[in-house]
Amino acid sequence: MTLTPTFLLPANETERLQTLHAYDVLHSLQEPLFTDIAELTATLFNVPISLIALVGADEVQYKAVHGLPGLRSQPRVEAICALAVKEEQVVVFTDLVHSHALTPEADKAARAKGLRFYAGAPICVAGGYCLGTLCLIDRQPRVFSAPEQRVLEQHAQVVAWLIEIRRHCLANRAQGHDDWVAVRTELAWEVKALIALVRYMATYSGTHAPVPTDVLELVGRRLSDLRWKLADYYPGAL
């Protein structure tokens, strides 16, 4: 029996949970490649915190954490990411202090950590099921433009494809683990190169909120290039 209030559940919750468990990723260890994606996202949008959250029946597990060391899990009712899974679309709170959409538990947890801004994009796999979110968090209010939302969605889609690739590799019990290690090592170079590029642009032109359109467009193109690389391992990325 779930402890999560029904108003936080999407209409396809039963099928969504079945899909989440089929991917065997909910209680997996945090892995460097996913952590690099969180770092890239935080660096691009100039926020201190970025998380990859996988939303289970009553608990949220964090597959990657940037900026909140030691965070591993949280009750679903306390996690703002639960709202993005419920809505199955980007959720933005420019100032959490003035939001009335949070559960009392989520509001209390956010205030305890001094969180003010949140933007989360759903991580949706084949079949359209939302396993969780890639989110940005800041300790001060900020605006978040429509172009920024689109690029955040691109990042979340990359995470979804990586989860697909991970599942495909690990399905081969004989050498699946070694294959996944090789894949994530190769892809890590691509992500780290993009992190370095974003840091260079921030040093050269300064940090801004919202992120300038030309920077978003450049990163968007690089993510599109990464999509072709991912397609070598997961044709569904095309």
Image: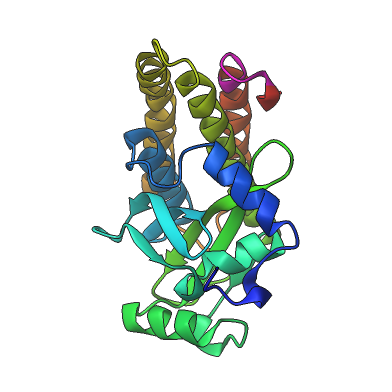
Residue 84 position by quadrant: bottom right
Is 191 within the magenta? no
In the depicted structure, whether residue 162 falls above or below residue 207: above
**Which coloring applies here?**
rainbow
Depth check: give the residue in front, 236 or 26: 26
| Residue 188 percent coordinates (x, y) | 38, 27
- Work out whether 96 lies above or below 45: below
- 173 left or right, relative to 211: left
From this viewpoint, is residue 112 visible? yes
Measuring 70% from the left and 63% from the top, which residue is drawn there?
A: 10
Quarter of the picture containing the C terminus is top right
Q: Quadrant of the N terminus?
A: bottom right
* Number of numbered callouts drawn: 0
- Residue 41, image x, y percentages: 46, 48
Q: Residue furthest front?
A: 1
Whether 220 is drawn above or below 165: the answer is: below
Q: Residue at x 56, y 38 (%)?
A: 22
Q: Which residues are magenta?
A: 230-235
* Closer to us: 31 or 201: 31
Rendered location of residue 64, percent (x, y): 38, 48
Left/right placement of residue 135 relative to residue 100 reads left
Residue at 35% over, 15% down: 178
| Left or right of residue 98: residue 176 | left
Q: Is residue 87 above or below residue 28?
A: below
> Can see residue 200?
no
Indicate the quadrant where residue 4 lies.
bottom right
Q: Is residue 189 left or right of residue 171?
A: left
